[in-house]
Image (spheres, rainbow, N blue to C red):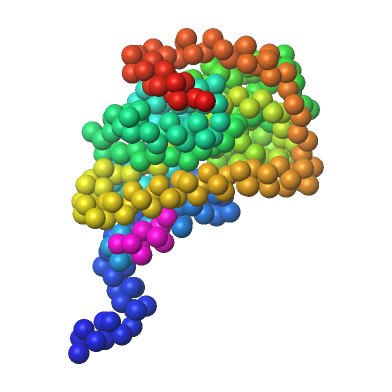
C-alpha cells in the first residue's frame, strides 16, 4: 500500500526526495537574464533529475549572498556551497591562477574553453586550493573585455591619461590598466555603477553583456573596443561537499556541469550580439581603437607576470593549444 502511494504520485515523490536531498546554494553576482544564471539554473534542474533529488542547486543571483571576494571565503568555510568567481579572485588566493588572467593569453573564447577544461593542463591548479576546502570545477567565459568611459571615446593609450578606470581586485589588472595608460582603481563589481555615476570613476572595463546587464552603459556611454583580454569565471565548490557525493552522483554532476558550460558558451555569442544592440538602443556608442598601440603597451606583461615555473608551464601549454 505504501509503495503504491509513493509510486502513484510522481510529483509528490519528487518533492519528498528533494526535501530529503541536499540543496547546494550557489552565489552569483549577475542578474537572472545573464547567460551564467540561465546555464546554472538549467544545470541545477538536470542535476536534481539525474540524482532523483539527492542533489539540488539553488542559484542566488545579484550578489545577494555577497560580493565575490566574500563568497569565495564562504565556500571555503562551507557556509555557501558553490559560487562563480572571477579568475582575479582566485589569483589573490593562489598566484598561479594569474596566468589565465593575463591579456593576450587566450586568442578566443573557444581557445580559452579548451584550455580551462583540459585536465592535462589544469588538474593540479584546480586542486591547489583543496587544503582551503575549495575545489575549482572549470568555468565560463567572461568574453572579451574592453574599456568604457563617460567622457568620450578612447582610441589610444594617451586618451586614457589621467582617467580613473575601474579594474577587478587584482595586482595584475592594476598593472595592465596602468600600461594601457590610465589610473587603475580596483573595486568590487557591485560598486562600479554608482562610482561612475558620481564621477569617482571615469570608466571601467568589462564585456558587452555586463556593460548592459549592470547598466553601466547608462553612465559610461563610450565603449571602446580594446578587446584587451578574454576573462574567465570559475565555478568553485566546497571540497567537503564534493567528497560526500556517491560515485554515481558525482559522475552525473560532472556530465551536467560539462553540458552547462557548453550551453553557456553557446548562449554567450548570442547574448553579446544582443547586448551591443541594446546598448546602442540605449544611446551607447561603440568605436574601434588603435589596436597595435594597446597590444604593444601590453606585450611586456608576459615577462613581468610569469614568476614561477608553474606559471611558465601553464602559459606555454596555453599558447601551445592556440590554433
Ligand atoms: C564580469 C564577470 C564577473 C566579474 C565582473 C567584474 O561580469 O563575469 O565574474 O565579477 O566581470 O568585472 O567584476
The magenta segment is 43-51
Residue 223: x, y in percent?
A: 72, 32
Image quadrant for the N terminus?
Answer: bottom left
Give the prevailing secondary structure in the magenta stretch.
helix
Occupied quadrant, residue 246:
bottom left
The reply to whether the magenta stretch includes residue 69 is no
Q: Is residue 93 visible?
A: no
Residue 247: x, y in percent?
A: 21, 52
Residue at 39%, 15% (x, y): give it.
312
Q: Is residue 276 above or below residue 128?
A: below
Occupied quadrant, residue 7:
bottom left
Residue 212: x, y in percent?
A: 66, 44
Residue at 45%, 14% (x, y): give it.
305
Camera-nearest residue between 63 and 120: 120
Residue at 55%, 47% (x, y): give it.
266
Residue 161 located left or right of residue 250: right
The reply to whether the magenta stretch includes residue 49 is yes
Q: Is residue 90 visible?
A: yes
Occupied quadrant, residue 288:
top right
Residue 157: x, y in percent?
A: 69, 15
Residue at 62%, 11% (x, y): give it.
296
Amino acid at each position: 500500500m505504501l509503495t503504491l502511494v509513493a509510486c502513484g504520485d510522481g510529483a509528490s515523490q519528487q518533492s519528498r526526495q528533494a526535501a530529503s536531498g541536499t540543496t547546494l546554494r550557489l552565489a552569483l553576482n549577475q542578474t537572472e537574464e545573464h547567460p551564467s544564471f540561465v546555464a546554472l539554473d538549467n544545470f541545477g534542474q538536470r542535476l536534481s533529475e539525474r540524482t532523483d533529488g539527492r542533489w539540488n542547486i539553488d542559484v542566488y543571483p545579484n550578489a545577494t549572498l555577497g560580493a565575490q571576494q566574500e563568497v569565495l571565503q564562504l565556500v571555503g568555510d562551507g557556509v555557501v556551497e558553490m559560487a562563480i568567481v572571477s579568475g582575479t579572485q582566485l589569483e589573490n588566493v593562489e598566484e598561479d591562477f594569474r596566468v589565465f588572467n593575463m591579456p593576450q593569453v587566450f586568442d578566443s573564447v573557444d581557445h580559452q574553453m579548451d584550455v580551462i577544461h583540459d585536465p592535462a593542463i589544469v588538474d593540479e591548479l584546480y586542486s591547489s586550493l583543496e587544503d582551503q576546502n575549495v575545489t575549482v570545477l572549470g568555468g565560463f567565459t567572461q568574453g572579451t573585455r574592453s574599456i568604457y568611459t563617460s567622457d568620450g571615446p578612447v582610441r589610444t593609450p594617451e586618451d586614457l591619461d589621467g582617467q580613473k578606470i575601474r579594474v577587478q581586485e587584482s595586482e595584475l589588472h592594476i598593472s595592465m590598466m596602468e600600461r594601457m595608460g590610465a589610473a587603475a582603481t580596483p573595486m568590487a563589481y557591485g560598486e562600479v555603477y554608482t562610482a561612475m555615476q558620481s564621477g569617482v570613476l571615469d570608466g571601467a572595463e568589462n564585456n558587452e553583456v555586463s556593460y548592459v546587464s549592470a547598466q553601466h552603459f547608462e553612465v559610461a556611454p563610450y565603449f571602446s573596443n580594446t578587446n584587451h583580454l578574454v576573462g574567465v569565471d570559475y565555478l568553485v565548490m566546497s571540497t567537503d561537499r564534493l567528497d560526500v557525493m556517491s560515485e554515481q552522483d558525482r559522475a552525473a554532476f560532472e556530465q551536467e556541469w560539462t553540458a552547462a558550460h557548453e550551453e553557456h558558451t553557446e548562449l554567450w555569442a548570442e547574448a553579446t550580439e544582443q547586448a551591443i544592440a541594446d546598448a546602442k538602443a540605449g544611446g551607447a556608442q561603440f568605436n574601434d581603437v588603435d589596436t597595435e598601440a594597446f597590444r604593444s603597451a601590453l606585450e611586456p606583461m608576459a615577462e613581468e607576470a610569469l614568476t614561477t615555473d608553474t606559471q611558465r608551464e601553464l602559459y606555454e601549454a596555453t599558447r601551445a593549444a592556440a590554433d
